[in-house]
């Protein structure tokens, strides 16, 4: 190549680089402005973080974390262990949520028998413990303004036919529904994938149980992470069971971390739920892929991305 042409090409390349650099800087500035505009804006869907999810950014106090969640655009929380908190703390949480205009998601109706053979056995001691805990859960729900409470019927009883076990579970759940129904509290049955001994494993099975209980206070918690592990076919199964689904939880698979860390197309799922008119809580029952404040910021960014379906 002639020296003159080489210098001309070099000059043009330099000008192009400067121009592209200017455009890139402008784009980065615009993106930065967009990030600032988005921060604090409520999400399209109603995601609910839990205690400890933003402890590095907001500190260890759950009330401070709730305020931080609100500032990031979240409008709900969930707290599996709410039943075990002191009554005064439950009330403080409820008061703060009310002040901020946030919703309380699920807490667990924890009898201490959720992870062993219990309601499926038909034994009166387990039914009595369940009814007692339902009554305690009702008082907790009043303090923290909860509308939903998670119920896990426990393990299979391998000594009984499946039909008998199912009837035993339905009988216990009807007794619980009678306690909740006059107060508008909804038990949500959660099919799980943690181990094969659990009685409730699929949304379809839970659907049949809810139809048998026949109460507006007995519905399904559709945990997307667990259902991906157990059955897959997430959206079609969700649609088939829709009439009995009252609450949804999130977690990507594998790893049970935030959306975008696994195989589940959460943007499509959120878009589908939005089209169906779902207004309930989407509980963020999962861990975090990163660590510290950076991990928490990345988690929020992941939700902003998955929520950008409109």
Image (cartoon, helix red, strand yellow):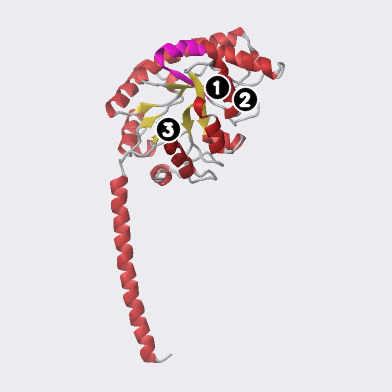
Position of 302 compared to 224: left or right?
left
Q: Quadrant of residue 167?
A: top right
Q: Secondary structure at mark 1?
A: loop
Counting residues from the start of the chain, the first of labels 2 and 1 encountered is: 1
Judging by the rendered image, the residue that carries numbered circle 3 is: 278
Residue at image location 53% in from the left, 43% down from the top: 264
Q: Which residues are magenta?
A: 176-189
Residue at image location 65% in from the left, 29% down from the top: 196
251 or 165: nearer the viewer: 165
Which corner quadrant holds the N terminus? Answer: bottom left
Counting residues from the start of the chain, the first of labels 3 and 2 encountered is: 2
Q: Quadrant of residue 98?
A: top left
Say few, some or many: other residues with alpha carbon within 10 Å of mark 1 (under 14 / 14 to 19 / 20 or more).
many
Counting residues from the start of the chain, the first of labels 3 and 1 encountered is: 1
Q: Position of residue 307 (x, y in %)?
A: 40, 43
Q: From the viewer's perspective, is residue 201 above or below residue 216? A: below
Q: Position of residue 285 (x, y in %)?
A: 47, 33
Structural distance between the alpha carbons of marks 2 and 1: 9 Å
Judging by the rendered image, the residue that carries numbered circle 1 is: 152
Structural distance between the alpha carbons of marks 3 and 2: 28 Å
Position of 128 compared to 106: left or right?
right
């Amino acid at each position: 190549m002639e020296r003159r042409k080489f210098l001309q090409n070099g000059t043009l390349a330099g000008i192009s680089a400067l121009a592209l650099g200017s455009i890139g800087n402008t784009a980065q500035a615009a993106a930065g402005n967009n990030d600032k505009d988005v921060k604090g804006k409520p999400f399209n869907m109603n995601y609910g973080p839990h205690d400890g999810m933003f402890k590095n950014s907001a500190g260890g106090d759950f009330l401070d974390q709730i305020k931080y969640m609100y500032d990031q655009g979240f409008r709900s929380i969930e707290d599996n262990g709410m039943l075990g908190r002191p009554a005064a703390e439950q009330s403080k949480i409820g008061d703060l949520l009310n002040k901020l205009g946030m919703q309380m998601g699920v807490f667990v109706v924890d009898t201490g028998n959720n992870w062993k053979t219990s309601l499926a056995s038909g034994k009166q001691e387990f039914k009595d413990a369940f009814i007692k805990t339902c009554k305690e859960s009702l008082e907790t729900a009043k303090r923290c303004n909860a509308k939903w409470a998670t119920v896990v019927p426990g393990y299979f009883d391998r000594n009984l036919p499946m039909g008998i076990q199912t009837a035993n579970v339905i009988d216990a759940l009807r007794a619980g529904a009678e306690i909740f129904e006059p107060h508008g509290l909804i038990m949500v049955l959660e099919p799980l994938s943690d181990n094969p001994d659990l009685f409730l494993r699929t949304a379809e099975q839970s659907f049949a149980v809810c139809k048998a209980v026949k109460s507006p206070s007995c519905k399904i918690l559709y945990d997307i992470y667990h259902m991906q592990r157990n059955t897959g076919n997430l959206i079609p199964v969700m649609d088939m069971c829709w009439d009995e689904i009252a609450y949804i939880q999130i977690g990507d698979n594998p790893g049970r971390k935030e959306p975008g860390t696994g195989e589940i197309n959460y943007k499509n799922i959120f878009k589908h739920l939005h089209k169906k008119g779902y207004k309930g809580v989407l509980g963020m029952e999962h861990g975090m892929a990163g660590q510290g404040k950076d991990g928490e910021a990345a988690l929020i960014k992941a939700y902003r991305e998955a929520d950008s379906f409109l």
